[in-house]
Image (cartoon, coloured by chain):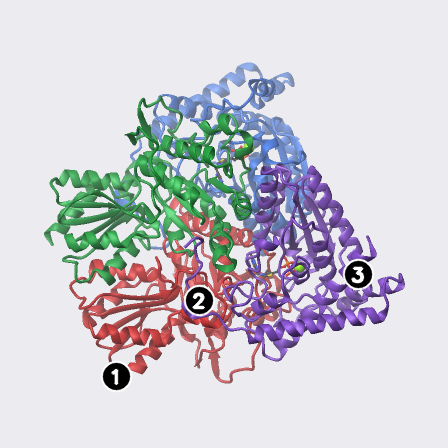
Chain colours: A blue, B purple, C green, D red
Amino acid sequence: MSDAVRRTILEWMIFTRVFDERLESLWKQGRGVGGTFNQRGHEAISVGAGMALGPDDVVAPLHRDVGCYLVRGMDPRRIMANQLGRETGVTGGRDANLHGCGDLSLNIIGFVSHLPQSLPVAVGAAMSFTYRSESRVAMNFVGDGSTNTGLFHESLNLAAVQRAPVVVVVENNQYAYSTPLAQQMAVEDLTARGAAHGVPAVAIDGNDADVVYETVGAFVEKARQGDGPALIVANTMRMRGHAIHDGYEYVPPELLEQWEQRDPVDRYARRLIEEGILEQAAVDAIRADAEATVADAVAYAESSAFPDPATLTDGVYADE
Amino acid sequence: MSDAVRRTILEWMIFTRVFDERLESLWKQGRGVGGTFNQRGHEAISVGAGMALGPDDVVAPLHRDVGCYLVRGMDPRRIMANQLGRETGVTGGRDANLHGCGDLSLNIIGFVSHLPQSLPVAVGAAMSFTYRSESRVAMNFVGDGSTNTGLFHESLNLAAVQRAPVVVVVENNQYAYSTPLAQQMAVEDLTARGAAHGVPAVAIDGNDADVVYETVGAFVEKARQGDGPALIVANTMRMRGHAIHDGYEYVPPELLEQWEQRDPVDRYARRLIEEGILEQAAVDAIRADAEATVADAVAYAESSAFPDPATLTDGVYADE
Amino acid sequence: MSENFGFTDEAETGNAMTYLQAISGALAAEMRRDDRVFVMGEDVGGQFGGAFKVTKPLVAEFGDRRVMNMPMTEMAFVGAGTGMALMGLRPVIEMQFADFISTAFDAIVQFAATTHYRWGAPVPWVIRAPADGGIRSGPFHSQNPESWFVHTPGLKVVVPSTVEDAWGLLVSAIRDENPVIYFESKPLYRRLTAAVTAEPAPVAIGMARLARPGEAVTVVTYGAMVHEALAAADSIGGDVVEVIDLRSVKPLDLDTVAVSVAKTGRLLIAHAANRLAGVGAEVAAFAAEELFTDLDAPVVRLGGADVPVPFSPPLEDAYRPDAGRIGAAVRELLEF
Amino acid sequence: MSENFGFTDEAETGNAMTYLQAISGALAAEMRRDDRVFVMGEDVGGQFGGAFKVTKPLVAEFGDRRVMNMPMTEMAFVGAGTGMALMGLRPVIEMQFADFISTAFDAIVQFAATTHYRWGAPVPWVIRAPADGGIRSGPFHSQNPESWFVHTPGLKVVVPSTVEDAWGLLVSAIRDENPVIYFESKPLYRRLTAAVTAEPAPVAIGMARLARPGEAVTVVTYGAMVHEALAAADSIGGDVVEVIDLRSVKPLDLDTVAVSVAKTGRLLIAHAANRLAGVGAEVAAFAAEELFTDLDAPVVRLGGADVPVPFSPPLEDAYRPDAGRIGAAVRELLEF
Ligand SMILES: Cc1ncc(C[n+]2csc(CCOP(=O)(O)OP(=O)(O)O)c2C)c(N)n1
Ligand SMILES: Cc1ncc(C[n+]2csc(CCOP(=O)(O)OP(=O)(O)O)c2C)c(N)n1
Ligand SMILES: [Mg+2]
Ligand SMILES: [Mg+2]
């Protein structure tokens, strides 16, 4: 990994953190619309994995992957405007928070709530690359909770039997909403869920952006070479509630404290400083920059119009 | 295994074979209604596993498990009448062939076509035993094809996390309709699909009734003792088409010849004769008996009335 | 995904009972009465007590055995509920949002709904499904999917609109021998209250309720839309508008509709679900078939637009009928 | 389970083309024309060519790459079809039986149907679903589930009833930018033939067809039931009965219905799907709203009973409308 790549990763992680903190404060101030999802703790995964893709690769990120949307080129203004239901948002006010934030011109597939419906879609995108002999790879994120779903297994099986070039990243953040891993499943090692379908699987520290970037990158290249799908279980912790209104009183404080020590953003900044790649002042400057850009995104979003109700039925069908 | 148990297993296997051959001939003669499923090759599994249950245990058999229905006490007349759409059939002409042949008084749960919908239902039956602290076990059969479905995985996961006393028997008959294993999945060892959920799994020779009976029996007792679910992969071969109208030209004849050597019924009869448990004459007598009973079932079914169309809407709801 | 938008615990409501408390209360009452009754669903147990906290009061009293947390696998746990029901238990299965009921579709429409017809075994479960929108939750937390299930043989489907019915219909649903889907109106959860002194009575499934008597127009509706219809009726005033709350959309109490239309000669139907092939289509079709000679004017249907429920406030407001639109349509109908 | 009851290969039909051959033919023609078009589904490829052999003629010409066998995982492969469609391909996805379309429900109604509305990406797939009964296949191989999808925003739904439409609607469905569900009528597969000399023309989606002109009663129907309606019309004789074949049930061509009813003043709707909240309810509701002054008699709906489709011949016959029942209802309607 070059210094430049690592610096870029740090920049995007800090940006993601700032963006998320801004969402929190907006909602606390009553300036939010509907609800939104907390991102804290997931930055190394969403940014590290997103960075590991090539420009023509396709990704289907989820609700904790603001970092990935950003890395892949989605304008923070459009994302913020979507959060606030504005016509300038990615979905023009049709879908909520990060839902539906797809854009084919950025090779991003938008998600629906029903988990993990994006996964077979990503597998299908990968199958289309094989169909057309294109040298592209698809990627999808899923939560630990989603590894229990039938569709997760059907999709891995389909990817395996089709040798589809798709990389699946599990964001194992210890909880599905309020339900801890032990109440979701009786298996401890999620890589067994790759083995069940003949999909190579590896578990990694999801709070270490270098590890995420390198592991995902390696599997992306393998997939591109024709080795088929891979499953990467990135272990992390959801550091806030499931969504903005969730008080997460069901999470033991000790668990949070423990993971706080391994905060992916701080840890990465410290590491790069220690390694002499940049200085604290540079980190502060990155943060200041991010804050300015996010403030601009908020201003843009809040000054954007709500969609015109006369457009209610526009766009249900393509080509009309 | 006592001689008596083994003799009973042989009797039921022969009965199942005769029943199935009779279905084939009825349909060839144009006396069938709709379609029906071939059973040949599955006798050791359906009979052996069915015999391994205790009287209060509950089973959800599938479309290749005539043997299991019979072993569990379902009258062959009622089964035959169901095949022919008669009011005396298990479903009174409402459901087709073996579909819907459930009877709670026999602790049998009927199936729907949508595979493997019986599996979570069996898991639920097992959960009810835990709920009520009953010393009972539930069992379900699924095909190899069904191990690819999401619902198979969701159900095993649920069973595991609930430690439900349920034993799942995979009838791995090399095909899902026309699709061979290699086009269904990229994994060779189906026990990995238990491991994915923390469910103990074992693969066995599904053409050896002793092995089936003993393995299933052992896991049933473990489940009864509170050890939770188990997965038994019984390897066999579907020796005819998927259903009665399927010419199975897609199955290589060599494969059939190879498995023919290991025919579960003949093999078991030979073994019991060799071990001196019975003589050829006794086997012939069992077969003759079976033929008489099946002939009676056919006569009963064919002389039964079709349901009265005036009853069309009866029984949609309970208690009305 | 479920964000529990705006539905955190709120201050106690004094003597009044909320719609949500009626649901919790009915569950607790039935669980006390009958050990076969239990609840299962995602996040219903533990310290959490459900995305809307409906089951929170149950956890302390009934424990893990009867408040069962499920993994996020709707198909499996509805199927398991069917197995438990077949064994004689009475599962009350919570969908985190009604929108996720489609994830369990086969387990409902193919297995549970058809079982009694095919082999005579009753499946006495209830699915509780928090439905409806108007609260800025977007396309996947605002759906009203009842029409799919009305069209499906073998189910019963109820949609309470009052605190008393929330209680009484849930009790009846739990005691029913058949699979019953109970759609809760999220917008009513904490907004609707009633002074309830005694335990509300069971409400028979399949009986509509005369929510407001009137002489000139019959408005047939259900769920949260009942309150919009009542507001519209009040705004028109007098005894002009008769409002019928269907309460049960399967079976439908068409007799009550017929009696009303025989009197008024005018029929308007309103619901939040997609108008196209919605429950209102069935009611209007019934009128076209059976009330032809009673009708003095065309039937009018108001319903959701044929689009995913949009998130942004102006779009969502345009999507749904409301008191204003019902009132305007009634006025127009009166002029026919 | 799929038994392929009675649908083994049959002798060639000479110059005539069967309904089934029209489907195969349209697929082959579109696959030749456009490399983006391919088929996927259970058992469609290899030596087998599908439970009904629709795709068998394609295997030799197009090979594994474009005739893709899928594991029995409808949700995953419809989802994958969506991914492939998003990437610009044109998947034609075969359900082994229409009954199994419910297994892919979320992938259809939640993902594919809503995508263009939410973020503007087209999902140009077709699902081919062998539907309908009357052929002793029981509750799970006889379903007509179109109403669920008519109620769902974002889909198109077509049901060809003739050889020419089987071809022409499939071509249009494949070329459409939206997700289209194409319900095939199993009872017509090999029973319905037509002398087709040139390649049939594409048939625009959303246009009903005047199947038979008449003056006194409008019968609106679709799918195999069209032939029952025509037989009923013939049995009544003359130009009494006008038969309209909807062809597309989403969008519905209600203008054509309106024009006809303006002439006849009488409307009967017939379909094999459950009458309750079926497509007929929507058409009848439209009439009650928009054709009120044109109607000289109550609307009549005939449809399947509100029960799972029963297996036994006398029960199944009682379940479905047929020419006899349509004729009787028309005669009664004429007497109003
Ligand atoms: C099919 C389905 N059922 C229920 C929900 C409601 N829901 C939203 S997120 C969530 C938990 C998801 O957990 P996980 O997959 O671990 O992702 P995380 O939110 O922890 O990142 C649930 C149950 C849903 N989105 N989809
Ligand atoms: C959900 C679903 N999709 C499709 C079918 C049609 N179908 C019936 S049996 C079958 C193959 C099943 O294979 P397997 O599970 O191996 O069981 P087997 O018939 O070989 O015993 C298929 C695809 C079905 N029954 N259910
Ligand atoms: Mg999680
Ligand atoms: Mg098989």
The residue shown at (31%, 54%) is: C276
Query: Toward which corner of the image does residue D290 lie, by quadrant?
Result: bottom left
Q: Position of residue D215 (x, y in %)?
A: 22, 77
The answer to whether residue B41 is above or below residue A149 is below
Amino acid under disc 1: Gly
* Quadrant of the displayed image that contains ligand 3: top right
Chain ID at mark 2 = D
The kind of secondary structure element at disc 3 is helix
Give the number of the disc on residue A288: none
How packed mark 2 is, by other alpha carbons closer than 10 Å (few <14, some 14-19, many 20 or more), is many
Chain ID at mark 3 = B
Which of discs 1 and 3 lies nearer the camera? The answer is 3
**Along the viewing direction, whichever of B75 and C20 lies nearer the viewer:** B75
**Along the viewing direction, whichever of B291 and A193 lies nearer the viewer:** B291
Q: Position of residue D67 (x, y in %)?
A: 58, 63
Amino acid under disc 2: Leu
Q: Position of residue A149 (x, y in %)?
A: 56, 43
Respond whether the residues carrying marks 1 and 3 are from the same subunit: no
Instruction: Give the residue number, with chain letter if any, for mark 1.
Output: D238
B279 with respect to D136 (left or right)? right
Distance of label 1 from label 3 (alpha carbons): 72 Å
Q: Disc 2 or 1, which lies upstream in sequence?
A: 2
Q: CB of residue at label 2: within 8 Å of ligand 2?
A: no
Respond whether the residues carrying marks 3 and 2 are from the same subunit: no
In the picture, which quadrant includes the N terminus of chain A?
A: top right
The residue shown at (68%, 61%) is: B67
Distance of label 3 from label 2 (alpha carbons): 58 Å
Amino acid under disc 3: Arg
Instruction: Give the residue number, with chain letter if any, for mark 3.
Output: B7
